[in-house]
Image (cartoon, rainbow, N blue to C red):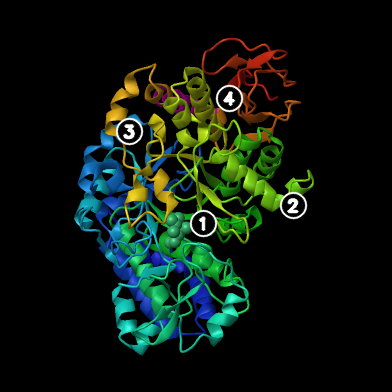
C-alpha cells in the first residue's frame, strides 16, 4: 500500500488529537509551550523514522481497531536468555513457540542493565541498547520482523518509572549536574524524604526497605521506590516525559507491537499521598495513548497495574478517552490460587462476578502466574464476611502453597516475608504449585495424575475467561521450580528466580510422549488452544456469567455468543463431584464430543468440563 505523500498521514492523525493532546500537556507542564513544540517535533521525527512495513501494519490495524480482541490471541511470557540464550536463539526457536500454539510473545526486559543490580532487567541503563549478552538492537528488529511474518505479535517492557543508577542521566546527576538531577528526585537532606515515608507504602519491605537512598557522590538523598539502584524518574519535568516517550517510540519502531508499561501506577509522586495511581498518572497514560495513535497506531499499551480492582479498571480510560488497551487480570489470578489452597470457590465466584459485569470491550490479559511473585491482594472485605482475617489467611495461603500445611502437595517459596506485617507473597511454577514436583519426587503416580489434572484444569479455566490467555514459558511442559538461584549470589536474595528457571529442552523433547507429564500438559494445552480458537463462544464479545453449581467447591462459568453456549465446570475439591446444571439446551463435551447428562455430571477431583450447546440460529 503506498503511503500518503509527505507527512499527510502524520498531520491528519496529529490534528485529530491536537486539541486534547495540547491542553493535557500544557495542564501537566504549566503551560510550557516550548516543551510542547519540542514534543511535537519529536513525534514527527519518530513517525518519519518508522519503516514502510510497520506503517503498513499500522494502517491495517487502524482499519480494524479491535484486532486484538475476539479470541485469536494466545500469549507466552519468557526471558530470552532462559529460553534460548540470545535473541538470535529465540528466532531459531520460533517454530517451537508456534508449536505451543501462541501468537503473542512477551519477552522480559532485554535492554542494557548492570549485572547484579538489574532487578531481572528492570533497571535499564540504556533504553536504546540491548543487553550485549542477548544481542543487538538489530537482532531485536529482525526478531520482530520474523514474528510478524509468522503472525506473532511481540510485547516488550517499557520500564518507565525509573532508570538504573548507571544510566547516563543518573551518572551526570551523581557528578552534580543540576539539570540531570532534575530528572530524578534529589533532596539535600532527609526532611522531605521522611515526610514522604509517612504516607508511601513499601514495594520490597525486606529486600529493599524504604523509598529513598543516600547517594554518596552527590551528597544527596534520591528517591528509589524499588531497589536502591533504580532511581525514580521525575515525570513532573517535561524533559523526562519527552525523552522517555521518544525512548518508547524507538522500541515501537523496532517492531514491538505491545508496550508493557511497567509499574505505571507509580510514575507521579506527590508529598502527602501514597504516590500510587495519582490523577496525573492517568493524564500521562492518556497522552501516551494519543502518542501511539499518532505515531504507531499498530501498537497496544499494556498497563502493569498490580492493584486492587477499583484501581485497575480506570486504566482502561473511558470510551472517548481510552488509556491502556490491555490490563492484567491480577486479582482474579491471586483469587485462583486462593481457591486452589482453600478448595472453596466462593471468593473466586464473587471476583469473577465483578469481572464479568465489566463492559466486554475491556480486554484483560489472563494468566496463572508471571515472572513476579503472587501477591495476596484479595478482596478481604468480602472474605471477612466469612470470618477470614487478612493476616491468618495469608499465613494459611503461604503455608499451603509452600507445602508446610499438612497434606499440601504444593512446593513454593515465600517472597518478601515481612514478619512485622505477616504479609509474605509467593513464588513457584504452576506445576510445582499444583503438586507435580512433590508427586514426581515421591514417585507417587496417583498424586502425579491428580496434580497434572489440576494443572490442566487451571489452564482450561484461564482459557474460559474473556481476553488474552498468557502462558509462562515452561508451564507448557509442566516445568518445575528451579532451586539453583539459591547458589547464585546475584540472585539468592530474590525468590522470584525460583520460577524464572532455564527452559529444560531435554524435558521439552518429551512433549510428544502422551504418557509423560510433559506430553500430557503439552497435548492438553494444544487441545484447549485449538478449541478456544475454533469456537466463537470464546469471543470477548460473548456474554459471560457465573453458573450456580450448588457446590462451593465447583466453579461454573457460562458463556454465550451468537448461537453457541458453553457451560464450564471446574472441580477445585479433592473429591469426585456429581453436579447437576440447570441450563437450557442439549450439551456435549467439547473435548470428547460425548453427550452430557445435565442431571449427573461426574467430575474427578481437579477435573473440568467444557459443555457446549448450539442453538440452530434461534435466540436463546
Ligand atoms: C514491575 C516488574 C517487576 C519489577 C518492578 C520494578 O513490577 O514486573 O519485576 O521488579 O516492576 O521495575
Q: Residue at x 67, y 43 (%)?
A: 351
User: Which mark is in front, 4 or 1?
Assistant: 1
Residue 587 at x, y percent in the picture: 63, 15
x then y, percent, for residue 421: 63, 60
Figure quadrant of the C terminus: top right
Residue beneath label 1, please?
416
Position in image of residue 600 (x %, y %)? 70, 12
Q: Which mark is residue 44?
A: none
For residue 130, which quarter of the picture?
bottom left
| Disc 4 and disc 1 in contact, CB within 8 angstroms | no
Separation of residues labelled 1 and 3 (CA atoms): 36 Å
Residue 92 sits above or below residue 582 on the image: below
Q: Badge 4 is on which residue?
A: 606
N-term-proximal mark, 4 vs 3: 3
**Residue 98 tag number:** 3
Q: Nearer the viewer, residue 453 or 354?
A: 453
Q: Relative to 113, say whether 372 is above or below.
A: above
Report the side of 359 relative to 138 (left or right).
Answer: right
Q: Which residues are magenta?
A: 522-536
Q: Residues within 10 Å of mark 4 (few under 14, many from 20)?
A: many
Residue that mark 2 sits on: 381
Q: Secondary structure at mark 1?
A: loop
Q: Is residue 27 above or below residue 5?
A: below
Q: Secondary structure at mark 4?
A: loop
**Residue 270 figure quarter:** bottom right
Label 2: which secondary element: helix
Q: Main secondary structure of the magenta part?
A: helix
Q: Tell me where residue 388 appears, x and y as whole percent.
A: 74, 46
For this rendering, which residue is in front, 97 or 25?
97
Front position among marks 2 and 1 = 1
Amino acid at each position: 500500500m503506498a503511503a500518503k505523500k509527505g507527512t499527510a498521514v502524520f498531520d491528519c492523525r496529529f490534528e485529530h488529537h491536537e486539541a486534547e493532546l495540547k491542553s493535557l500537556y500544557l495542564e501537566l507542564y504549566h503551560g510550557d509551550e516550548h516543551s510542547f513544540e519540542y514534543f511535537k517535533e519529536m513525534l514527527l521525527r519518530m513517525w518519519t523514522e518508522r519503516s514502510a512495513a510497520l506503517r503498513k501494519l499500522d494502517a491495517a490495524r487502524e482499519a480494524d481497531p479491535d484486532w486484538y480482541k475476539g479470541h485469536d490471541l494466545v500469549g507466552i511470557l519468557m526471558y530470552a536468555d532462559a529460553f534460548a540464550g540470545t535473541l538470535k536463539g529465540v528466532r531459531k526457536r520460533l517454530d517451537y513457540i508456534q508449536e505451543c500454539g501462541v501468537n503473542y510473545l512477551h519477552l522480559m526486559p532485554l535492554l542494557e542493565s548492570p549485572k547484579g543490580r538489574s532487578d531481572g532487567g528492570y533497571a535499564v541503563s540504556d533504553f536504546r541498547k540491548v543487553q550485549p549478552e542477548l544481542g543487538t538492537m538489530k537482532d531485536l528488529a529482525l526478531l520482530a520482523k520474523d514474528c510478524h511474518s509468522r503472525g506473532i505479535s511481540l510485547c516488550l517492557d517499557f520500564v518507565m518509572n525509573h532508570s538504573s543508577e548507571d544510566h547516563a542521566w543518573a551518572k551526570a546527576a551523581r557528578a552534580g549536574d543540576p539539570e540531570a538531577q532534575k530528572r530524578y528526585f534529589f533532596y539535600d537532606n532527609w526532611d522531605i524524604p521522611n515526610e514522604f515515608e509517612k504516607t508511601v507504602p513499601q514495594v520490597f519491605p525486606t529486600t529493599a526497605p524504604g523509598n529513598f537512598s543516600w547517594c554518596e557522590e552527590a551528597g544527596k538523598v534520591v528517591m528509589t521506590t524499588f531497589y536502591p539502584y533504580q532511581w525514580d524518574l521525575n515525570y513532573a519535568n517535561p524533559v523526562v516525559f519527552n525523552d522517555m516517550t521518544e525512548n518508547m517510540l524507538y522500541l515501537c519502531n523496532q517492531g514491538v507491537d505491545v508496550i508493557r508499561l511497567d509499574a505505571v501506577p507509580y510514575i507521579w509522586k506527590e508529598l502527602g499521598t501514597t504516590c500510587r495511581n495519582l490523577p496525573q498518572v492517568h493524564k500521562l497514560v492518556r497522552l501516551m495513548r494519543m502518542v501511539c495513535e499518532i505515531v504507531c497506531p499498530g501498537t497496544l499499551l499494556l498497563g502493569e497495574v498490580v492493584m486492587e480492582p477499583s484501581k485497575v479498571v480506570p486504566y482502561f480510560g473511558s470510551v472517548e478517552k481510552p488509556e491502556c488497551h490491555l490490563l492484567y487480570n491480577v486479582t482474579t489470578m491471586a483469587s485462583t490460587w486462593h481457591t486452589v489452597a482453600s478448595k472453596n470457590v466462593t471468593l473466586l465466584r464473587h471476583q469473577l462476578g465483578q469481572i464479568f459485569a465489566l463492559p466486554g470491550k475491556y480486554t484483560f490479559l489472563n494468566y496463572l502466574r508471571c515472572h513476579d511473585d503472587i501477591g495476596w491482594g484479595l478482596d478481604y472485605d468480602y472474605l471477612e464476611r466469612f470470618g477470614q482475617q487478612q493476616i491468618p489467611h495469608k499465613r494459611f495461603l503461604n503455608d499451603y502453597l509452600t507445602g508446610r500445611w499438612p497434606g499440601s502437595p504444593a512446593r513454593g517459596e515465600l517472597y518478601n516475608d515481612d514478619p512485622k506485617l505477616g504479609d509474605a507473597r509467593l513464588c513457584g511454577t504452576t506445576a510445582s504449585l499444583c503438586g507435580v514436583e512433590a508427586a514426581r519426587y515421591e514417585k507417587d503416580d496417583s498424586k502425579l495424575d491428580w496434580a497434572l489434572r489440576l494443572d490442566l484444569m487451571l489452564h482450561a479455566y484461564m482459557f474460559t475467561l474473556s481476553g488474552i490467555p498468557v502462558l509462562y514459558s515452561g508451564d507448557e511442559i509442566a516445568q518445575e521450580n528451579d532451586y539453583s538461584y539459591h547458589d547464585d549470589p546475584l540472585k539468592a536474595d530474590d525468590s522470584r528466580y525460583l520460577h524464572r528457571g532455564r527452559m529444560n529442552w531435554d524435558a521439552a523433547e518429551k512433549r510428544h510422549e502422551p504418557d509423560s507429564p510433559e506430553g500430557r500438559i503439552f497435548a492438553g494445552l494444544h487441545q484447549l488452544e485449538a478449541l478456544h480458537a475454533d469456537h466463537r463462544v470464546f469471543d470477548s464479545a460473548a456474554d459471560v456469567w457465573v453458573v450456580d453449581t450448588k457446590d462451593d467447591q465447583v466453579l461454573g462459568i457460562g458463556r454465550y455468543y451468537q448461537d453457541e453456549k458453553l457451560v464450564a465446570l471446574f472441580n477445585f475439591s479433592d473429591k469426585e463431584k456429581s453436579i447437576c446444571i440447570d441450563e437450557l439446551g442439549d450439551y456435549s463435551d467439547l473435548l470428547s464430543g460425548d453427550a452430557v447428562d445435565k442431571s449427573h455430571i461426574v467430575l474427578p477431583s481437579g477435573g473440568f468440563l467444557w459443555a457446549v450447546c448450539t442453538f440452530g440460529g434461534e435466540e436463546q
